[in-house]
C-alpha cells in the first residue's frame, strides 16, 4: 500500500505537504475558497473578452458564493421523483438542478464544499486528498472497475424475492455512490491540484513532480480504458435496459436500475473530466503516451472526447430507435424519444457541453454529431464504414425516425444550464439537414394500400405463430365500431374488418358471400399466387382465415389448398414454407374451435412434416440447410402444441399429427432443439392425461386447479402447466364447451390412438437416451415421468416390451436402474414418489419393494452428486468443482419426499429422531437416516424382526460400492472421495450391529477391500493421491470404531475380523505417523481420534488392544541394538493415547511397558528417553502397585522380567530406571528387591571376580530411596 499514500503516512516526508493543517476551520476554508474562486473569475473574464464580461461575471460570482454547511451528495442521474421534488423537471440530485454542468462550463470548482479535508475516503480506504490521484491513479481506476463488477454481479444475483429487495437496493446504491464519489473527486483534483509540467534549471524534477507531469497522459489512458470497460449503452443486456421502465414511488430499485444509471453517469462524467482537463491545461493536447507506445494507435484527450461523445450520441439514438418501433405514427408527436428523464437530461447536457466547446474551438457542435449519426442510418452496412467513424444503427424506417427524433430534440434547446425551461430561448438552427429530409420525403413513393395516418408496420409483419395469426384475424371479425379501427389497425385489417361485417349481414335473404365469392376467388390464379411475396402470402392467409371464420369453413379451406398447389416447390423458400405451415395450423385451430374433425387437413401437413424430418435426419454438416429445416420443423411442433392446447376433448383426430416423422426428428435434435421437442411432448402428455383421467368429462377441476398442483399431477413444468390452464380457460369462455358436457364415447378411441402414437413414435428415443454417455436434458426425466403416469392411466397401449406391468417396467428403466444418470433419476422420482395412484398400483400388484428400491436410488443419487465434477488437474475453478445449484435443490426436494415414505417415517419413529432432519441438506439427511436404521435395529427384540431389518437394510443399500466406484477409479474429485468415505464410514459405525450379521458380512468385507485395503494401499512404498489419503485420514475413525464393535459381536468370523482390523491399523498407522513427534501432527492421527471417541468399553478395549499389539509387533521391534524408525513419533503416539484415555489397561502393561523399558535401556536419544520416561510414569502411577490387584501383579511381573533380562549387561541403566520408579511407587520397588538381589548375585557369579562394588553401591541407593 506504499503507492496508495494513506493518511497515516502523509506527514512523513511526502512529495507534497498536506494542504491544510488540522487547526484550520470550516469558515477559513470557505473564505479561502471564495478568494480562490474570485481569482478564477478574473481569468475567465480575460479569456472571454469584454462583450460577455458582465453577465458571465455576475453568474460566476453568484455560484462562487453558494457555500453550504454540510457535505453535499455528488450529482447523478436519477428518475426517482417524489412529492418533495417541488415541481422540478429533473431530480434535485441531477447534473442540471445540482449546478454541476453550470460550474464546469463557468470553470468553477466542481464541488466547492467537498474534499476539503486532509484525507478523503475512496472505496473504503483513506487517501491524502492532494496526492492520491498522482501516486495511485491506475490503482484507483482499478478499484472503480472492481466496484462496477460488483454491481454487475448483484444484477446477476437479483431475484424476485421481495424480502431481499431493500437489501439489494441499499448495497447497489452504496456501490454506485462510491463510484460517483471517486469520479467527482477526479474532477476536483484536476481543477484544484493539477499544474502544468515544470522543468527546473538543472532539468531535474522531484519524483513526485515527475508523476504529476505524467498524470494528464495517465488520466486519458484510464478514461479510455474505463469507457471500453463499461462498453456501449446500446449493448447493455436486455434485463438492464428494461430498468428504464421501472416506476417506484418508494425508491426501492433493483440492482439493474442502479447499474443502468451508473452507466449513464460514467458516460457523462468521462466527458466532464476530459473537458475540465482540457480547460486546466489551456486546451493543450494531451497524448496517451503509454497507450500509443503499446498499440501504435493515436490517442489524445481531444480524440477521446470526440470519439466518446460521438459514441454516446449514437447509443442514445439507438435507444430512441428501439422506442420508435413501439410508437404508432398517430402518436408520434406525443410520444417522446427518451425512456426516462435521465436520458432527456443527458441529451440536454450534451447540447450544452458540445455547443459550448464549439464556440471556443473547432470541435463539432451538437447538431453536427447528430446529423452524422442519422445519415449513417440511411447508409447500408457495406458503405457505412468509410462514411463515418460511428457505427451504423439499424432502422427499418430511417426517414420517419429522423423526422421523429429531430422534432423531439429541437425543443431541448429551450432548457437552460439549470434544467429550467426557457421558451424564449432561441434554438440553434439545423436547417441544412432538415432540408435534406424534406427532399427524401418528397422523393418517397407512398403505397396506394394505406391510410395516410396509419403505418405500414403491421401490414408488413409476418405472424410468428399460427395462434397469433389467427388471433390477429379474429380481431377483424368481432363486433367492433369502425371508427375505433382507425386508431388500432392498418388499412388492410380495416378492409378485412369491413368485409367481415358485410359477410355477417344478409341482404333480402341473400347471403353476401354468394355475391362476393366469385369476385374474391377470381383474384387468385396461378400467376398471381406465384407472384405473391412473403407479406402478400401472409395477407392471403389473413383473408381466407377471416372467410373461414365467418362463412363456409370447409369450402374456404378446400379452395385455399387448391390455390396453394399453384406454388411451385422450387419457388418456395424456407421462410415462405414456414408461413404456409403456420397458415395450415391456423385453419386447424379454426376446425378445433368449431369442433370439426381435422383428419384430412392434419394428414396433409403431417405428411409434409415427415418428409422434412427425414431430410433433417440426414443433414448433419450443412449448417444453413439444417437451420432452414429446423425453422420448418419448429413451426410444425408449435402448431401441433397449439392444437392440443386448444382442443378441449382431443376427440377430433389429433393423433394424425403425431406420426412417425418424430422417430426421425428426435435422434437428429441437439440441445435447444431437443428441449423444445420434449417440452412439446410434455404438453401433449399432460393434455391427454387430463382428458383421460376424469371419465371423459371436462370438469371445473381445471378452473380451480393451481399451476403448482397441475404441474405435480402431470409431471410438467410450471410454465407448461400455466399455458395449459390458460388455454382451457379460453376454450370454456368461447362457449363451445361446458364443464358438465359429457364427451361422446368415440373420444375414448381417439385417446387410445393418441396414447398409441406417443408410445410408438416418441418413447423408443426416450428409452435410448437414459443411458447416454453425456448428461441428458432434465426435461428427459420430466417426460419419462409423464410416460410413467400415462402407463398407469392407459396401460394397454404401452409397448410390448414393457408389458405386462408397464408402470413397473418404467420405474425399473428410469428410477431404479443403477446405470442411469443420478440427475435424471432424482428428477424422475421426485415427480412420482408422492403420487398416490402409483403407490396404490404397486400395492395392488403385490410389489412390496417399491419404497425400498426408491430409497436405494436416493442413496445412489446422494453418493453420486459429484459424479460429473472434474478431478485432479481438470478442476480449474471452485465453480467447476461445486455441485450445481439446480441439482442440489433437486436432491433436497427428493430427500424431503423420501422422508415422507411410510417405511422411512416408521424407521425415524422407532429411532425417536425429530423432524428437524427434514431441513438438512441431502448428505446430512442420509447420515441421519443411516443412524436411524442402526438405532431401530438395536431396539428390536425378536430374531425374525432383526432378520427382516437386515434384509431391508441390504435392500436399501443395494450395491453401494458400485455407486462410488467411479470416484475410486478416477481418484477424484476430492469432494466425491470425501463424501464416499464419510457416508460409508457412517454406515460401518452406526450400522455395525447389522454388518456383524452373517447376511451382511460379505458387504462389510467388500467395503474393507475396496475402500481401506485396496491394492494401492498395500504397497507401502507407493504414494497415494492426496485427495484419497485426505478422505481416508478424516474418516478412518468411523471404520475402526465400527469394526471394533463388529469384532466384539461376531461369533463366526471373530478371528478373521480381528486379523482384518489389525491389518488396517498396521497399514494406516505408519502412513499417518509424522516423522517427528509434534503436537499438531500427532493430534490429527485417525487412530488417536478413534481411540479417544466416546464408544462403548468393549469396543474401546478391543481397538486399543489391537492397536498396541500392532505397534509392538511392527513399530517397536529392534534390529539387534538398532532402534526402529520414527521411534520418537511412535512413543509420542502411545503417550497421547495414555493421556487422552486417562486409564491404564492390562494390555498397556503387557504390550507397551516392556518395549518402552527396552527403549530406556538401549536408546540414548534425549527425546526418546523423555517420552519413554513419561510413559513409564503414566503406567506406574495408573497401576499403583501398592493397591494390589491384577494390574499391580502384572506390573511387578514386567519389571521382574526386565531386571532379569538387562541387569547383567546394563546394570547401571537398570538401577537408574529403578531409582526413578522408586520415587513413583516404593511398594513396587520393595517387591522387586529379592529379584534385584538374585540378579546381582548371578551377575557376580558369572563374572567370577567376587563382589561388584559399583553394582552393590547402586543397589544400596535403591534401598535408600525405598526406605525414604
Image (tube, helix red, strand yellow):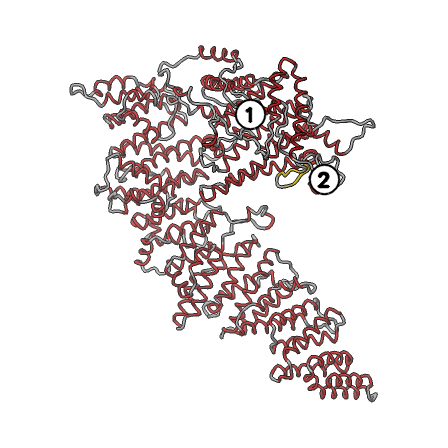
**Residue 625 percent location from the top left of the image:** 45, 30
Q: Say whether residue 49 is left or right of residue 162.
A: right
Instruction: State the SS at label 1.
Output: helix
**Residue 50 percent location from the top left of the image:** 65, 13
Q: Say whether residue 1010 is left or right of residue 1192.
A: left
Give the quarter of the image for residue 616: top left
Residue 1200 visible to the viewer:
no
As rendered, which of 138 and 25 lies closer to the eye? Answer: 25
Instruction: State the SS at label 2.
Output: loop
Q: Residues within 10 Å of mark 1 (few under 14, many from 20)?
A: many
Which tag is nearer the camera, tag 1 or tag 2? 2
Up the image or down, 1263 lies above or below 903; here it is below
**Quadrant assignment for the N terminus:** top right
Asked if the residue under mark 2 is in contact with the one under mark 1, i.e. CB atoms within 8 Å, the reply is no
Up the image or down, 304 lies above or below 1177; here it is above
Up the image or down, 1154 lies above or below 550; here it is below
Q: Which labelled disc corresponds to residue 10?
A: 2
Q: Which residue is mark 1?
A: 312
**Residue 932 percent location from the top left of the image:** 44, 64
Give the quarter of the image for residue 304: top right
The first of marks 1 and 2 along the sequence is 2
Looking at the image, how many numbered discs can be counted on the residues?
Answer: 2
Q: Say whether residue 1096 is left or right of residue 944.
A: right
Residue 808 visible to the viewer:
yes
As rendered, which of 337 and 911 lies closer to the eye? Answer: 337
**Quadrant assignment for the C terminus:** bottom right
Amino acid at each position: 500500500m506504499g503507492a496508495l499514500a494513506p493518511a497515516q503516512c502523509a506527514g512523513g516526508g511526502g512529495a507534497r505537504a498536506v494542504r491544510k493543517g488540522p487547526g484550520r476551520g470550516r469558515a477559513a476554508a470557505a473564505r479561502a475558497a471564495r478568494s480562490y474562486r474570485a481569482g478564477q473569475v478574473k481569468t475567465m473574464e480575460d479569456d472571454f473578452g469584454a462583450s460577455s464580461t458582465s453577465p458571465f461575471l455576475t453568474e460566476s460570482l453568484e455560484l462562487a458564493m453558494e457555500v453550504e454547511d454540510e457535505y453535499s451528495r455528488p450529482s447523478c442521474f436519477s428518475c426517482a421523483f417524489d412529492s418533495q421534488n417541488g415541481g422540478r423537471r429533473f431530480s434535485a440530485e441531477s447534473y442540471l438542478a445540482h449546478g454541476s454542468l453550470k460550474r464546469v462550463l463557468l470553470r468553477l470548482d466542481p464541488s466547492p464544499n467537498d474534499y476539503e479535508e486532509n484525507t478523503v475516503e475512496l472505496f473504503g480506504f483513506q487517501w491524502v486528498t492532494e496526492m492520491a490521484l498522482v501516486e495511485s491513479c491506475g490503482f484507483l481506476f482499478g478499484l472503480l472497475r472492481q466496484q462496477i463488477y460488483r454491481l454487475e454481479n448483484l444484477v446477476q444475483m437479483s431475484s424476485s424475492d421481495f424480502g431481499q429487495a431493500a437489501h439489494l437496493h441499499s448495497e447497489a446504491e452504496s456501490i454506485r455512490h462510491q463510484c460517483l464519489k471517486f469520479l467527482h473527486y477526479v474532477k476536483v483534483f484536476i481543477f484544484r491540484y493539477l499544474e502544468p509540467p515544470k522543468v527546473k534549471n538543472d532539468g531535474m524534477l522531484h519524483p513526485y513532480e515527475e508523476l504529476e507531469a505524467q498524470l494528464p497522459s495517465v488520466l486519458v489512458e484510464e478514461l479510455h480504458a474505463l469507457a471500453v470497460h463499461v462498453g456501449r449503452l446500446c449493448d447493455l443486456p436486455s434485463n438492464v435496459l428494461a430498468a428504464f421502465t421501472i416506476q417506484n414511488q418508494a425508491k426501492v430499485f433493483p440492482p439493474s436500475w442502479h447499474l443502468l444509471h451508473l452507466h449513464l453517469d460514467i458516460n457523462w462524467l468521462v466527458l466532464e473530466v476530459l473537458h475540465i482537463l482540457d480547460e486546466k491545461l489551456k486546451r493543450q493536447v494531451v497524448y496517451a503516451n503509454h497507450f500509443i507506445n503499446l498499440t501504435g494507435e493515436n490517442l489524445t484527450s481531444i480524440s477521446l472526447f470526440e470519439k466518446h461523445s460521438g459514441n454516446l450520441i449514437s447509443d442514445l439514438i439507438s435507444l430512441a430507435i428501439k422506442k420508435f418501433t413501439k410508437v404508432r405514427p398517430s402518436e408520434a408527436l406525443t410520444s417522446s424519444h427518451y425512456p426516462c428523464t435521465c436520458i432527456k437530461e443527458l441529451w440536454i447536457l450534451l447540447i450544452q457541453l458540445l455547443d459550448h466547446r464549439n464556440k471556443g474551438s473547432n470541435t463539432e457542435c451538437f447538431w453536427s454529431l447528430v446529423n452524422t449519426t442519422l445519415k449513417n442510418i440511411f447508409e447500408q452496412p457495406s458503405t457505412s464504414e468509410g462514411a463515418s467513424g460511428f457505427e451504423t444503427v439499424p432502422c427499418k424506417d430511417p426517414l420517419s425516425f429522423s423526422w421523429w427524433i429531430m422534432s423531439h430534440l429541437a425543443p431541448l434547446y429551450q432548457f437552460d444550464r439549470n434544467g429550467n425551461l426557457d421558451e424564449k430561448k432561441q434554438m440553434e438552427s439545423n436547417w441544412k439537414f432538415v432540408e435534406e429530409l424534406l427532399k427524401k420525403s418528397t422523393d418517397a413513393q407512398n403505397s396506394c394500400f394505406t391510410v395516410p395516418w396509419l403505418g405500414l408496420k403491421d401490414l408488413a409483419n409476418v405472424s410468428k405463430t399460427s395462434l397469433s395469426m389467427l388471433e390477429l384475424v379474429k380481431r377483424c371479425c368481432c363486433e367492433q365500431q369502425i371508427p375505433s379501427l382507425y386508431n388500432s389497425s392498418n388499412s388492410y385489417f380495416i378492409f378485412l374488418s369491413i368485409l367481415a361485417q358485410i359477410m355477417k349481414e344478409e341482404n333480402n335473404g341473400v347471403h353476401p358471400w354468394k355475391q362476393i365469392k366469385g369476385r374474391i376467388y377470381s383474384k387468385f390464379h396461378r400467376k398471381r399466387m406465384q407472384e405473391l411475396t412473403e407479406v402478400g402470402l401472409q395477407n392471403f392467409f389473413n383473408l381466407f382465415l377471416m372467410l373461414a371464420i365467418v362463412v363456409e369453413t370447409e369450402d374456404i379451406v378446400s379452395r385455399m389448398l387448391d390455390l396453394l398447389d399453384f406454388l411451385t416447390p422450387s419457388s418456395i423458400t424456407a421462410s415462405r414454407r414456414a408461413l404456409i405451415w403456420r397458415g395450415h395450423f391456423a385453419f386447424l385451430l379454426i376446425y378445433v374451435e368449431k369442433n370439426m374433425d381435422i383428419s384430412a387437413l392434419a394428414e396433409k401437413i403431417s405428411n409434409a412434416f415427415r418428409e422434412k424430418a427425414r431430410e433433417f435426419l440426414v443433414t448433419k454438416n450443412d449448417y444453413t440447410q439444417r437451420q432452414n429445416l429446423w425453422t420448418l420443423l419448429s413451426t410444425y411442433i408449435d402448431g401441433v402444441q397449439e392444437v392440443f392446447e386448444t382442443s378441449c376433448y382431443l376427440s377430433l383426430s389429433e393423433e394424425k399429427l403425431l406420426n412417425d416423422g418424430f422417430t426421425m426428428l428426435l435422434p437428429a435434435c441437439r440441445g435447444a432443439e431437443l428441449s423444445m421437442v420434449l417440452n412439446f411432448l410434455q404438453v401433449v402428455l399432460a393434455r391427454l392425461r387430463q382428458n383421460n383421467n376424469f371419465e371423459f368429462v371436462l370438469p371445473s377441476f381445471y378452473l380451480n386447479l393451481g399451476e403448482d398442483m397441475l404441474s405435480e399431477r402431470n409431471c410438467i413444468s410450471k410454465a407448461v402447466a400455466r399455458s395449459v390452464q390458460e388455454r382451457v380457460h379460453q376454450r370454456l369462455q368461447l362457449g363451445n364447451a361446458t364443464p358438465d358436457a359429457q364427451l361422446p364415447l368415440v373420444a375414448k378411441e381417439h385417446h387410445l390412438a393418441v396414447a398409441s402414437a406417443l408410445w410408438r413414435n416418441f418413447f423408443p428415443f426416450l428409452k435410448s437416451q437414459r443411458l447416454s454417455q453425456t448428461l441428458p436434458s432434465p426435461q428427459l426425466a420430466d417426460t419419462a415421468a409423464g410416460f410413467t403416469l400415462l402407463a398407469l392411466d392407459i396401460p394397454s397401449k404401452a409397448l410390448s416390451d414393457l408389458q405386462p406391468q408397464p408402470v413397473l417396467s418404467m420405474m425399473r428403466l428410469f428410477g431404479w436402474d443403477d446405470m442411469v444418470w443420478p440427475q435424471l433419476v432424482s428428477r424422475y422420482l421426485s415427480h412420482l414418489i408422492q403420487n398416490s395412484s402409483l403407490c396404490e398400483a404397486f400395492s395392488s400388484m403385490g410389489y412390496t419393494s417399491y419404497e425400498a428400491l426408491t430409497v436405494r436410488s436416493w442413496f445412489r443419487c446422494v453418493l453420486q452428486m459429484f459424479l460429473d465434477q472434474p478431478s485432479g488437474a481438470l478442476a480449474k475453478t471452485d465453480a467447476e468443482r461445486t455441485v450445481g445449484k439446480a441439482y442440489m435443490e433437486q436432491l433436497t426436494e427428493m430427500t424431503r419426499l423420501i422422508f415422507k415414505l411410510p417405511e422411512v417415517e416408521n424407521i425415524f419413529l422407532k429411532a425417536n429422531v425429530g423432524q428437524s432432519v427434514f431441513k438438512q441438506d441431502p448428505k446430512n439427511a442420509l447420515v441421519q437416516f443411516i443412524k436411524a436404521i442402526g438405532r431401530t435395529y438395536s431396539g428390536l427384540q425378536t430374531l425374525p424382526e432383526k432378520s427382516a431389518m437386515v434384509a431391508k437394510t441390504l435392500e436399501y443399500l443395494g450395491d453401494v460400492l458400485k455407486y462410488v466406484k467411479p470416484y475410486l477409479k478416477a481418484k477424484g474429485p476430492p469432494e466425491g472421495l470425501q463424501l464416499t468415505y464419510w457416508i460409508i464410514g457412517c454406515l460401518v459405525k452406526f450400522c455395525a450391529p447389522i454388518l456383524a450379521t452373517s447376511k451382511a458380512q460379505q458387504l462389510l468385507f467388500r467395503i474393507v477391500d475396496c475402500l481401506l485395503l485396496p491394492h494401492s494401499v498395500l504397497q507401502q512404498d507407493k504414494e497415494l493421491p492426496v485427495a484419497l489419503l485426505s478422505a481416508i485420514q478424516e474418516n478412518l475413525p468411523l471404520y475402526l470404531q465400527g469394526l471394533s464393535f463388529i469384532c466384539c459381536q461376531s461369533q463366526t468370523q471373530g478371528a478373521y475380523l480381528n486379523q482384518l482390523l489389525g491389518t488396517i491399523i498396521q497399514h494406516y498407522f505408519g502412513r499417518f505417523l509424522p516423522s517427528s513427534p509434534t503436537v499438531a501432527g500427532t493430534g490429527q492421527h485417525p487412530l488417536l481420534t478413534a481411540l479417544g471417541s466416546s464408544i462403548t468399553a468393549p469396543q474401546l478395549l478391543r481397538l486399543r488392544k489391537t492397536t498396541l499389539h500392532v505397534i509392538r509387533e511392527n513399530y517397536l521391534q529392534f534390529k539387534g541394538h538398532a532402534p526402529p524408525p520414527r521411534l520418537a513419533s511412535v512413543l509420542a503416539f502411545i503417550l497421547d493415547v495414555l493421556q487422552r484415555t486417562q486409564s491404564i489397561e492390562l494390555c498397556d502393561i503387557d504390550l507397551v511397558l516392556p518395549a518402552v523399558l527396552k527403549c530406556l535401556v538401549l536408546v540414548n536419544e534425549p527425546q526418546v528417553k523423555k517420552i519413554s520416561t513419561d510413559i513409564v510414569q503414566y503406567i506406574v502411577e495408573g497401576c499403583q502397585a501398592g493397591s494390589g490387584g491384577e494390574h499391580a501383579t502384572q506390573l511387578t511381573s514386567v519389571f521382574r522380567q526386565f531386571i532379569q533380562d538387562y541387569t547383567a549387561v546394563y546394570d547401571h541403566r537398570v538401577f537408574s530406571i529403578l531409582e526413578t520408579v522408586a520415587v513413583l511407587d516404593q511398594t513396587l520397588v520393595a517387591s522387586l528387591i529379592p529379584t534385584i538381589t538374585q540378579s546381582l548375585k548371578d551377575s557376580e557369579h558369572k563374572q567370577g571376580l567376587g563382589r561388584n562394588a559399583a553394582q552393590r553401591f547402586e543397589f544400596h541407593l535403591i534401598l535408600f530411596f525405598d526406605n525414604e
